[in-house]
């Protein structure tokens, strides 16, 4: 399947901006330098190294803690308008608690932001990209309601430290990965396996934490600093496997369980109706006294509703969904509550990550779906990208991927009027890909992890992306397969 045959002829409007992204634990290294505290990914990789490919960890990663000036030059070479990076909570507040700011850690991000501004690149900041301070895990992590206040105070610290320069804030990156993979199936830190309760409780605390951070910004900073804040939620596009009504219903339900779970509360104040119903019904049959899905009070509903200025959206792939007969009542789990079959078409082209299938039309459908079901919000595509194993500099497959996804986004803007205002390529450079270690490479720039210098080198996709940004359109000649 080639996706380059129907490239959009539209151009990116002048207000549309381009960026590239990374996250603290995946690139910074310097895991115990200058007063930084231990976080759950330090702990998870050090104590459970067998759960990571080749026992890898982020102790050094791309060494961006020491090489941020080089990183800014890479961004400059790309010609991007902004850089989306995340802040390591334990660098700023080594214990996680907002009692004492670690000066050296705070200074690192001051330096990075200053360097970005000096090069005309806007800093876009993710407040939490998965690296919770370990002491907060000791009290239960995102299962503990206390995190709501603690997170809001951490966010307040960042607004006061950096808010004069940072105008785009994202509270959480991909809450479903935090809660489902971290507290449900245990593939990500902290590695807990509580499939029927962990994800829901975690999500409940995250959503309240997000809302509180939004209000803190609104009440104390917004007027003076004039920035905007949102959450980053990811989802595959879920396409019904057939046009059968039950398959359509199953696809919609999957979108609600995976994406609506977080965005429905932000837009409407509460979880999707279908989630509330299904989890309550199954909980009852399983003998629980109350639903495993926690409930918001009406006060909380009002407090949460509308707490976003834009929606951050990550998408890499698409899946097919089939109706699944009601799973038997047995082990309570989020997956049984959702109750659908999810799979991929084996003829689709693939990246190196086992979940990454190249389906560019999926992003267009997803954007339209968001527009029509969630009140036509501003959408920032906060991540999209392609992985390979070898990290080749001749990365024509990445170029094809980026080109076809950008094309689908362009059509969504011009033909469907979706308010997508920004695109962010994942990732600026090859980095630590969580449990896959360094074996799946998403970078526009190659990083030599064998060398202590962590030398960066431009791949062909750098030229491609720079060209798109400069010309504001897609050009057939950019791709090798077409030339
Ligand atoms: C993002 O995760 C992260 O934000 C980033 O840190 C990471 O490096 C990057 O993308 C690349 O992975 O349907 O059960 O098969 C994206 C993680 C993983 C989200 C696969 C959707 C589908 C799981 N994605 N997942 S499943």
Image (tube, rainbow, N blue to C red):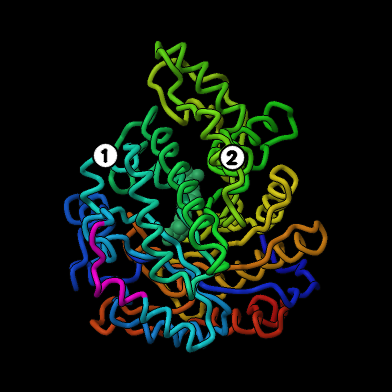
Binning the other alpha carbons within 10 Å of mark 2 as few (below 14), some (14 to 19) or many (20 upward) gives: many
Please name which of the two marks, 1 or 2, marks the residue nearer to the observer.
Answer: 1
Q: Position of residue 446 (x, y in %)?
A: 41, 78
As for residue 102 lying within the magenta part, the answer is yes
The dot on residue 108 is none
Q: Which residue position is annotated with label 1?
A: 140
Q: Quadrant of residue 186?
A: top left
Q: Is mark 1 within 8 Å of ligand 1?
A: no
Kindly identify the residue that appears in the image at 71 percent across and 55 percent down.
Answer: 364
Q: Which residue position is annotated with label 2?
A: 260
Comparing 431 with 375, the one in front is 375
**Can residue 56 be seen?**
no
Q: Position of residue 419 (x, y in %)?
A: 72, 60
Left or right: 170 with respect to 191? right
Q: Position of residue 267 (x, y in %)?
A: 63, 43
- Residue 347 to residue 294: above or below: below
> What range of the chain is rendered magenta?
99-109
Q: Is mark 2 within 8 Å of ligand 1?
A: no
Comparing 170 with 41, the one in front is 170
Q: Position of residue 128 (x, y in %)?
A: 40, 57
Left or right: 23 with respect to 238? left
Q: How many discs mark residues in the rendered view?
A: 2
């Amino acid at each position: 399947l080639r996706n380059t045959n129907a490239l959009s002829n539209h151009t990116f409007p002048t207000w549309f901006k381009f960026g590239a992204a990374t996250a603290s634990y995946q690139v910074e290294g310097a895991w115990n330098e200058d007063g930084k505290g231990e976080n759950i990914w330090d702990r998870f990789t050090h104590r459970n190294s067998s759960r990571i490919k080749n026992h890898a960890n982020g102790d050094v990663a791309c060494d961006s803690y020491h090489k941020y000036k080089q990183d800014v030059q890479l961004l400059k070479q790309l010609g991007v308008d902004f850089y989306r990076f995340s802040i390591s909570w334990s660098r700023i507040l080594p214990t996680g608690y907002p009692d004492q700011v670690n000066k050296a850690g705070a200074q690192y991000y001051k330096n990075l932001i200053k360097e970005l501004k000096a090069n005309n690149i806007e800093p876009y900041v993710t407040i939490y990209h998965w690296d919770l301070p370990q002491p907060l895990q000791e009290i239960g992590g995102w299962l503990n309601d206390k995190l709501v206040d603690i997170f809001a105070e951490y966010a307040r610290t960042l607004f006061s430290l950096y808010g004069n320069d940072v105008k785009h804030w994202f509270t959480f990156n991909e809450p479903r990965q935090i809660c489902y993979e971290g507290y449900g199936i245990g593939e990500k830190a902290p590695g807990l396996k509580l499939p029927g309760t962990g994800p829901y409780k975690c999500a409940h605390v995250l959503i309240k934490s997000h809302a509180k951070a939004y209000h803190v910004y609104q009440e104390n900073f917004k007027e003076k600093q004039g920035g905007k804040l949102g959450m980053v939620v990811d989802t595959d596009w879920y396409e019904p496997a057939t046009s059968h009504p039950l398959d359509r219903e199953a696809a919609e339900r999957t979108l609600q369980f995976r994406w609506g779970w977080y965005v429905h509360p932000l837009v409407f104040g509460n979880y999707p109706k279908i989630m509330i119903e299904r989890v309550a019904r199954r909980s009852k049959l399983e003998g629980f006294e109350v639903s495993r899905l926690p409930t918001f009070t009406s006060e909380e509903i009002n407090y949460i509703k509308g707490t976003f200025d834009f929606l951050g959206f990550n998408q890499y792939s698409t899946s097919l969904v089939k109706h699944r007969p009601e799973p038997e009542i047995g082990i309570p789990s989020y997956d049984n509550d959702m109750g659908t079959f999810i799979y991929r078409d084996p003829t689709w082209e693939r990246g190196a990550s086992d979940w990454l299938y190249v389906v560019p039309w999926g992003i267009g459908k997803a954007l339209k779906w968001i527009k029509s079901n969630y009140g036509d919000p501003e959408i920032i595509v906060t991540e999209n990208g392609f992985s390979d194993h070898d990290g080749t500099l001749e990365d024509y497959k990445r170029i094809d991927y980026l080109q076809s996804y950008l094309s689908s986004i362009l059509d969504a803007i011009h033909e469907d009027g979706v308010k997508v205002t920004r695109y962010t390529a994942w990732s600026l450079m090859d980095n630590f890909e969580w449990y896959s270690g360094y074996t799946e490479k998403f970078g526009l720039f190659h990083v030599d992890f064998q060398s202590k210098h962590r030398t960066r080198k431009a791949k062909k996709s750098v030229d491609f992306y720079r060209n798109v940004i400069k010309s504001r359109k897609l050009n057939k000649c950019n791709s090798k397969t077409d030339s």
